[in-house]
């Protein structure tokens, strides 16, 4: 048989190895009752001849697609956290029998539509979600369906599902403390959407710390850290006006929104880090290269993606194992910007 001109099949591998087709199939799926030497030999031959499983056939035989879907908003911060998340989830699935697909959610779309489509058509065996809400309808639906999933972010039901989250309430406290140490007393907070769990947490933490210190903090109206740059600039500029509120510090939650805030500051001919300080969370060491005076807090999105990939794999392969849950807590006394650049 000329394997260069015909698509390789399980039978092709069987002929080349002298093993029965069922043995080849089980070896490729990682079955533990097949010896490691045999599994390795079959996998090497499959790689050498360019064997790709027929997914329709796999689904018919096993009822599985061997796909994990990462469900993401098209408004996501692709230059920062989201890019890291995609790369790390993909790396976490590398070398397994599962493939990663990205399912987009459009701003004008009911976020339940892609979730129902995945579950009802069995387009994937598990999903990973982000931008979670406290009573997230997607989580409620998936739990009722008994469909494997993990979330980047917590919900009110977090005790009952796999998740990885960053402690954004502590982040709010840290942001205010670091800006207070620079003598700032009038804060503007460009928060994430308030219907999302992490948005509520940042606001709660920052407000509590500002109240404790007896300083003023206003949450920006008319825009969030997910808004287009033009909307952010329009919403932030009035709070910077020297004849009005005259904010001397801005807290935000993403690199893209921080850059829009810098534009608003400089449009009013104010100087970053001199007249107005900015504090932002970031997943890549970028902002201090954009404007050296920006204060940043590192969020390890790579660790999040790796953890979430492991969580859905456990839910698929050993569903009786304990839930995987992790809360990453930032620390005020740790120079995470320097750490991320080293």
Image (spheres, helix red, strand yellow):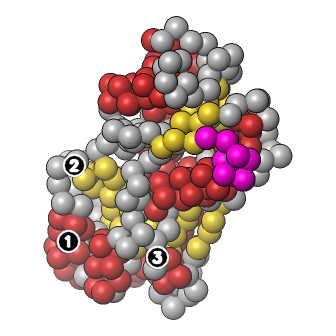
* Spot occupied by residue 161 in the image (x, y as percentages of width and height): 47, 79
Disc on res. 276: none
CA distance separating discs 3 and 2:
25 Å
Q: Indicate which label's residue lies in the foreground, 3 or 1.
A: 3
Image quadrant in which the N terminus is located: bottom left
Position of residue 299 relative to residue 270, above or below, is below
Q: Which residue is mark 2?
A: 106
The magenta stretch spans which residues?
Answer: 210-216
CA distance separating discs 3 and 1:
21 Å
First in residue order: circle 3 vs circle 1: 1
Residue plotted at (48% across, 12% down): 268
Q: Which residue is mark 3?
A: 156
Position of residue 273 relative to residue 269, above or below, is below
CA distance separating discs 2 and 1:
15 Å
Q: Indicate which label's residue lies in the foreground, 3 or 2.
A: 3
* Spot occupied by residue 263 in the image (x, y as percentages of width and height): 46, 18
From the viewer's perspective, is 174 left or right of 168?
right
* Spot occupied by residue 269 in the image (x, y as percentages of width and height): 52, 8
* Spot occupied by residue 189 in the image (x, y as percentages of width and height): 52, 40
Please indicate, yes or no, whether residue 71 appears anywhere in the rendered image: yes
Q: Which residue is mark 1?
A: 116
Per the image, label 1 sits on a secondary structure element best described as: helix
Q: Is residue 133 magenta?
A: no
Q: Report the front residue among 313 and 2.
A: 313
Q: Residues within 10 Å of mark 1 (few under 14, many from 20)?
A: some
Q: Quadrant of residue 110?
A: bottom left
Q: Residues within 10 Å of mark 2 (few under 14, many from 20)?
A: few
């Amino acid at each position: 048989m000329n394997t260069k001109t015909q698509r390789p099949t399980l039978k092709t591998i069987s002929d080349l190895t002298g093993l029965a087709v069922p043995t080849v199939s089980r070896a490729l799926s990682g079955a533990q009752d097949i010896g490691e030497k045999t599994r390795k030999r079959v996998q090497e031959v499959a790689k050498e001849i360019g064997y790709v499983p027929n997914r329709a056939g796999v689904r018919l035989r096993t009822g599985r697609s061997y796909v994990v879907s990462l469900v993401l908003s098209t408004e996501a911060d692709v230059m920062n956290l989201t890019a890291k998340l995609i790369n790390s989830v993909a790396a976490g699935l590398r070398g397994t029998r599962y493939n990663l697909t990205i399912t987009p959610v459009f701003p004008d779309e009911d976020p339940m539509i892609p979730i129902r489509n995945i579950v009802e058509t069995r387009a994937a065996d598990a999903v990973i979600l982000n931008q979670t809400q406290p009573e997230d309808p997607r989580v409620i639906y998936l739990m009722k369906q008994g469909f494997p999933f993990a979330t980047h972010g917590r919900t009110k039901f977090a005790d009952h599902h796999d998740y990885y989250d960053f402690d954004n309430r502590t982040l709010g406290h840290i942001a205010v403390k670091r800006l207070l140490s620079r003598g700032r007393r009038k804060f503007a907070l460009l928060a994430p959407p308030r219907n999302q769990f992490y948005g509520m947490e940042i606001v709660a933490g920052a407000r509590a710390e500002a109240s404790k210190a007896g300083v003023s903090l206003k949450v920006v109206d008319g825009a969030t850290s997910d808004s287009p740059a033009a909307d952010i600039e329009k919403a932030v500029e009035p709070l910077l006006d020297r004849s009005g509120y005259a904010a001397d510090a801005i807290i935000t939650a993403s690199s893209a929104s921080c850059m829009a805030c810098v534009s608003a500051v400089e449009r009013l001919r104010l100087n970053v880090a001199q007249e107005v300080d900015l504090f932002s969370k970031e997943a890549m060491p970028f902002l201090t290269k954009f404007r050296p005076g920006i204060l940043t807090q590192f969020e390890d999105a790579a660790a999040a993606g790796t953890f979430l990939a492991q969580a859905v794999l456990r839910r698929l392969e050993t569903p009786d194992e304990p839930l995987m849950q992790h809360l990453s807590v930032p620390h005020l006394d740790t120079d995470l910007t320097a750490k991320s650049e080293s």
